[in-house]
């Protein structure tokens, strides 16, 4: 019964459209057969001569109109038959071209034959015209340069063939709508989100993925850690199996970043978002403690938060280090193979912020996992390079200079190993 209810709406739409088409056809089809130069009058169903300035080139036809041609000069216009007077001259288009109305005054031109339909307008009762689409020579008996009065214009009615074509299109549209609705209904409970519960609701015929709170918190933490510029790089690496998530979107604020992550999740409701997000972070140099594939969303958020806290303390150390090094900050970057990254970050910025950002991003590649020595690779590496630069003034008091970093590391005993 539920499937019948879903099917009833498209069928009702089809019934209404077919009924309307049938009514229109019944009112506009002539019962008589007319010949060249005449049209069928709908009221009397008799054949009447085409008015001056119009023509009908078909024989044995039920057409209820004559075609108005009012301008007989221009490219591809040709004299089909010379008459005894200007009024009897037959004008038309060259082979491969059809007449097309080009102005409200009824002027026409010869255009290359196509499969499109043209609608004309006049002050006579409104009907629709479908011009011939096959390559043929259309004819008229209007003189060169003459302008037909709008009172004598007859506008073409849709032919039976056109009606059949429209009906076919309607049927196809109805079938497609029904198939889409049926597919959405079957997939309504097919996606599982990170916490293991179905989180796909339907709003009308559009599937809407409801983002759980823990995943929203993780998204906010990612945006906080990366900032706007790094986030623009992250979205390039986000998996997009649905092919509906657009990565080249414009980002102007942090709020845009949070919205983009939610859009990504809603576009791809059937994937493990936290795991894919961690993998994408690793591809741009933000590496969390090992075995992150075994962590749930809350644990991933905790690891990312602690890594961000550690990195923040390290960045404060880098600011003091830049002041102590002076111009030698370039030598340290060269020894760490970070000079190219530094040069890229220098665009539109001062050397201090570029130096700190470069070392800060580099440090994220060394996730801190607590051990008895309580050491961290970035600090150890920087200390070694400073020693090779003979900066004993910094090395001898290194632990005091990096005291805030060691203080943060001492709180990391709960990070999963």
Image (tube, rainbow, N blue to C red):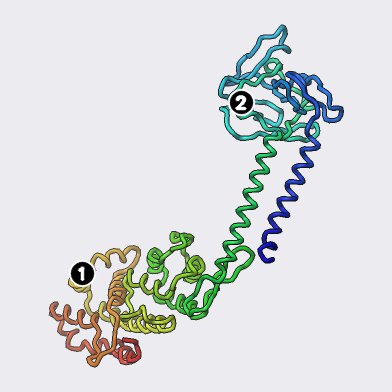
The residue to which callout 2 is attached is: 98
Residue 396 image point, x, y percent: 17, 88
Res 382 quadrant in image? bottom left
Which image quarter holds the N terminus?
bottom right
In this orientation, which residue lies closer to the viewer: 293 or 251? 293
In this orientation, which residue lies closer to the viewer: 101 or 243? 243
On screen, 282 above or below 298? above
Residue 337, disc: 1
Q: Is residue 401 left or right of residue 187?
A: left
Which image quarter holds the C terminus?
bottom left
Residue 43, disc: none
* Residue at the far top in the pictured view: 84
Residue 116 image point, x, y percent: 61, 35
* Number of residues whose C-alpha sits closer than 10 Å to that of mark 1, classed few (under 14), some (14–19) or many (20 or more): few
Element class at badge 2:
strand
- First reached walking from the N terminus: tag 1 or tag 2: 2
Residue 32 in view here: yes
On screen, 113 above or below 380? above
Task: Please give the name of the residue rendered at 60% of the width and 27% of the height, measured from the top-left corner.
Answer: 134
């Amino acid at each position: 019964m539920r499937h019948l209810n879903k099917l009833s709406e498209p069928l009702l739409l089809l019934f209404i459209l077919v009924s309307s088409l049938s009514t229109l056809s019944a009112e506009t089809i002539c019962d008589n057969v007319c010949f060249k130069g005449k049209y069928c009058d709908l009221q009397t169903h008799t054949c009447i001569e085409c008015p001056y300035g119009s023509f009908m080139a078909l024989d044995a036809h039920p057409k209820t109109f004559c075609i108005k041609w009012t301008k007989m000069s221009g490219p591809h216009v040709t004299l089909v038959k010379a008459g005894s007077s200007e009024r009897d001259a037959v004008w038309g288009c060259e082979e491969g071209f059809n007449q097309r109305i080009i102005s409200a005054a009824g002027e026409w031109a010869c255009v290359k034959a196509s499969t499109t339909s043209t609608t004309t307008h006049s002050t006579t009762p409104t009907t629709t015209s479908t011009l011939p689409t096959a390559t043929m020579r259309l004819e008229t008996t209007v003189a060169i340069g003459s302008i037909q009065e709008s009172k004598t214009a007859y506008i073409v009615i849709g032919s039976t063939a056109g009606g059949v074509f429209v009906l076919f299109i309607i049927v196809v549209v109805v079938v497609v709508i029904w198939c889409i609705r049926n597919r959405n209904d079957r997939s309504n409970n097919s996606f599982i989100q990170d916490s293991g519960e179905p989180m796909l609701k339907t709003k009308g015929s559009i599937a809407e993925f409801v983002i759980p709170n823990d995943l929203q918190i993780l998204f906010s933490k990612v945006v906080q850690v990366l900032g706007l510029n790094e986030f623009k790089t992250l979205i390039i690496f986000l998996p997009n199996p649905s092919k509906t998530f657009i990565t080249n979107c414009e980002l102007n604020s942090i709020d845009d970043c949070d919205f983009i992550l939610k859009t990504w999740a809603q576009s791809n409701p059937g994937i493990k978002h936290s795991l894919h997000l961690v993998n994408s972070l690793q591809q741009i140099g933000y590496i969390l403690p090992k075995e992150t594939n075994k962590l749930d969303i809350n644990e991933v958020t905790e690891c990312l938060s602690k890594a961000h806290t550690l990195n923040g303390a390290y960045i404060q150390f880098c600011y003091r280090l830049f002041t102590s090094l002076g111009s030698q900050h370039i030598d340290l970057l060269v020894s760490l193979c970070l000079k190219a990254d530094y040069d890229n970050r220098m665009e539109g910025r001062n050397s201090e912020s570029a130096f700190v950002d470069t070392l800060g991003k580099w440090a994220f590649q060394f996730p801190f996992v607590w051990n008895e020595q309580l050491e961290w690779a970035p600090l150890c590496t920087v200390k070694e390079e400073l020693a090779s630069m003979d900066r004993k003034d910094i090395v001898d008091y290194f632990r005091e200079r990096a005291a805030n970093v060691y203080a943060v590391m001492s709180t990391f005993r709960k990070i999963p190993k």
